[in-house]
Image (cartoon, rainbow, N blue to C red):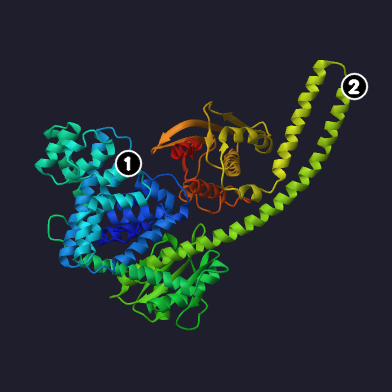
Amino acid sequence: MQIAPDIQLPSLPEVTLRALEACHQDESYRRISDIVSADTALVARVLALANSALYGPTSQIRSIDQALLRLGTRRFHTLVLTAALRQILYELGADQWQQLRDFWRHSLTTALTARALATLTRYPEPDQAFMLGMLHNVGELIALKTPPGETQQYYFDHQSDIAAELVNSWGLGPMAVDAMRYQQAMPTEIRDAGHLVKLISLATRLALSDAAGIAAAGTVFGLNEELTREINRRIDQEVSGVAESLGIPLSEDYDARHSNHKLKQTILKQAMASQALELSPIRGSAQESLAATVTSLTLITGLPALYFGQAGDGLTLLSASNGDTPDLTVASGPATSVLTEAYSSGTVLCLGDRTTTVLDRQLLSLLKTPSLVAIPVQGEDQCAGVFVVGTDHDNSAHTEDIGRLFSAKLSNAVADTLAHNESSQAGMETELARQAIRRQVHEVSNPLTIIRQYIYQLRNRLDDDEVQEELDVIRDELDRAGDLLLQISRAPSHDAADTTGACNLNDELRILRDLLDDSLFSGDDRILELDLCEAPTDITVPGAVIRQVIINLVRNAAECLIDGGEVSIHTLAPVWQSGKTWVELEVADTGNGIPDEVRKYLFSPVRSTKGKGHSGLGLSVVKQLIDDMEGIISCRTGREGTVFRILFPAAANKKNDEK
């Protein structure tokens, strides 16, 4: 029976709720990965999308982390919301919810056991073993959502084949397929099988915590009973810890009605917040758009609302949904009222039982309600304005929840609009600069050509061989300078459009060294050092992309050397990480480090702190280019300087895949 690779499967509502919350609160990538990894349905969705045609022919995924990196944050957030919407369509009975909880516990126990065994037996990719442990009984999950009958029984009876078929369709590789296919083989039959097959087969048996599993551990890996029981005990503790963190009860009958109702409410609130933006999307100036959105907010919530926009050092009432907008401007400090405190703190606040100030009473009079909620909207580098929504004491908590969702979505929309406008402006500035460069290159090329002709004539008049050789060197250098000028004058858009191909990282750095030295390190107070490894540095990245990354990073580093200093570029190859081979590039400077307020938005297209003329888009562009090539970028910074480390996919990976 054919199984669709992007099959929709049910999750425990507690897991889906926690994933939605993590996305909404922009929690760390590691925390999001931990939540996803603990649920078979989410793992299946991530793998199906990460291996879809959206990404073209790509290398095998060997861990959930790799799949999430390929998806990116925004696609993953969309995936979670879609999974949550489908989740509320599943109408499972009490017995089915109980079975789903037991399935979740067994899958997680198997996955954790597989990873522990992989570490113990020195399997090189324990995260791959964990991922396959989560997927080994996916056929049972398909059966749980299938009505009773022959089809459901088929899924129960053919779990190994179903898992193997799906793993194959997700491109996880032949060894992973075998691990699924032979998971139920007898221990005596797999003693000389592949390492991954033995790990998954033994993990599925140990997850049952019976005598047969203990005996299988001795047969397959020669583990003694005492060690095996200790592994089981620790895994049980870890599963209990994960369940507690997600709010999943394990020691009592499982009733999902409350969590499922909460999930429905959460999705409804998110949909309402999103719909408000659809009714009045962000266009034009941010303040005009935010002021227009106040009516949409009222249509969605059924509550009157005001919008105060930032104006100098104060806040001005720009729009009201329940009548004429009076002339009201207030100071943004001190933060004593709900409005001013929400503005200064950047958090949603409810009037509740607080002692009202005169401004609070004025707002309640305008809204004609007994209570209110203040909803700040984050702008480019500070709060852009505050919505004030009228409510009553009974519904203030509900209004506050919607306010938080609405604020987050609206803040993202404002940031996207500002980034788009800034990017468009930067594009115009870039084109003007490019035209100016072409004119300057033409002016410089003319005297270079004349000098080269005079050197040629002078060489023919001299009989001294040594002088002729020296003149040849000068002429070669002039030719090289001319080539560099030609490269500079070419439109980058033509070169960057080539998103296929490969290059040698060291060669690209040698080509760029003189250009960077002349343009950014011409003074005596700045030094550029190049330290290139001797090993091959061939990577599966076009040269145009590499040049864009290097120029952006080195320019940022040079501009950080306010009082002079050094920028050093290092390469290292090969580097082994996550089952792949990489070529490493490190760009380090001896500046004063990146300020705390900039680190939070390090790779986001926000305004730079480096002064006029710097849009802050450089690192955002670099991050996007690295993500597109499935590379890895990291940064460490402090008082002694900043270091950016990039791992480029080595060409050796592609050669190995083609074998």
Residue mark closest to the camera, 2 vs 1:
1
Judge by depth and name the residue closer to the eye, 53 or 383.
53
Q: Position of residue 260 (x, y in %)?
A: 24, 66
SS type, badge 2:
helix
Is there a contact, CB below 8 Å, between mark 2 and mark 1?
Answer: no
The quadrant in which the C terminus is found is: top left
Q: Return the residue at label 2.
A: 461
User: Residue placed at 34% from the left, 49% from the top?
Assistant: 168
In the image, is 87 to the left or to the right of 282? left
Q: Residue furthest bottom?
A: 323
Q: Amino acid at mark 1?
A: Met
Q: Position of residue 395 (x, y in %)?
A: 30, 75
The quadrant in which the N terminus is found is: bottom left
Q: Return the residue at label 1.
A: 175
User: Residue placed at 17% from the left, 59% from the top?
Assistant: 99
Instruction: Measure the C-alpha gap from mark 2 to mark 1.
Output: 73 Å
